[in-house]
Image (cartoon, grey):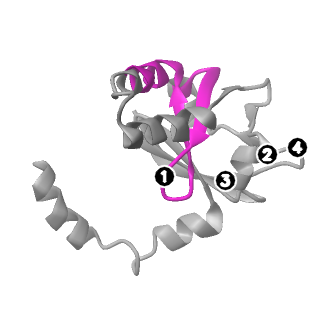
Amino acid sequence: MLIGQYEHSLDAKGRLIMPAKLREDMGEKFIITKGLDGCLFGFSQSEWENFETKLKTLPLTNKTARDFVRFFLSGAMECEIDKQGRFLISSNLRNVATLEKEVVIIGVGTRIEIWNKSSWEKYNSEENISADSIAENMTMLGI
């Protein structure tokens, strides 16, 4: 399971170190794509295949479904970890998530999220996220 929060820096070429604790679950090759809330999503090969399978079941005749599929697949790219534990993030994906020097990688179960550090701090702030209000709303999802 992918868990934890890790801070790293992008190098001048747009490469980022994959935290060692996440590397085993992500594998040597994995997929990153545009995510939600201003971050990038990263999936292991097997999780990406699960996600793709779900996308294939969406009806082609539904515009919202087509938009959803386009959003995730148009930005997707395969990444490979080099001998130093780094992977390259394309410039278009760096732009999508406004990734600059300071980056936060978080594990969220079946995927990682890659955030601009200041965006993550703003998103994760007490003003934005209230554990009590989240817990109250989770009852609607059966948790």
Q: Amino acid at mark 1?
A: Leu
For label 3, the crowd category at 10 Å Cα-Cα, with few meaning under 14, some 14 to 19 and many 20 or more, is some
Q: Which residues are magenta?
A: 26-53
Residue farthest to the front, as pictured: 61
Circles 1 and 4 in contact, beta carbons < 8 Å: no
Circle nearer the viewer, 1 or 4:
1
Left or right side of 102 for 55 = left
State the residue at coordinates (53%, 20%).
45
**Location of residue 126 with respect to 43 vertically, above or below:** below
Q: Could you say which disc has been placed on residue 65 in the image?
A: none
**Location of residue 96 with respect to 55 vertically, above or below:** below
Circles 3 and 4 in contact, beta carbons < 8 Å: no
**Residue 21 image point, x, y percent:** 54, 35
Question: Which of pointers 2 and 4 lies earlier in the amino acid sequence?
Answer: 4
Q: Amino acid at mark 3?
A: Val
Circle nearer the viewer, 3 or 4:
3
Q: CA distance from mark 1 to mark 3?
A: 10 Å
Circles 1 and 3 in contact, beta carbons < 8 Å: no
* Nearest to the observer: residue 85 or residue 42: 42
Q: Secondary structure at mark 4?
A: loop
State the residue at coordinates (67%, 56%).
103
Q: Amino acid at mark 4?
A: Lys
State the residue at coordinates (39%, 19%).
53
Q: CA distance from mark 3 to mark 4?
A: 17 Å
Q: Could you say which disc has been placed on residue 91 in the image?
A: 2
**Residue 11 image point, x, y percent:** 84, 48
Q: Which residue is mark 3?
A: 96
Question: Which of pointers 1 and 4 lies earlier in the amino acid sequence?
Answer: 4
Q: Which residue is mark 1?
A: 36
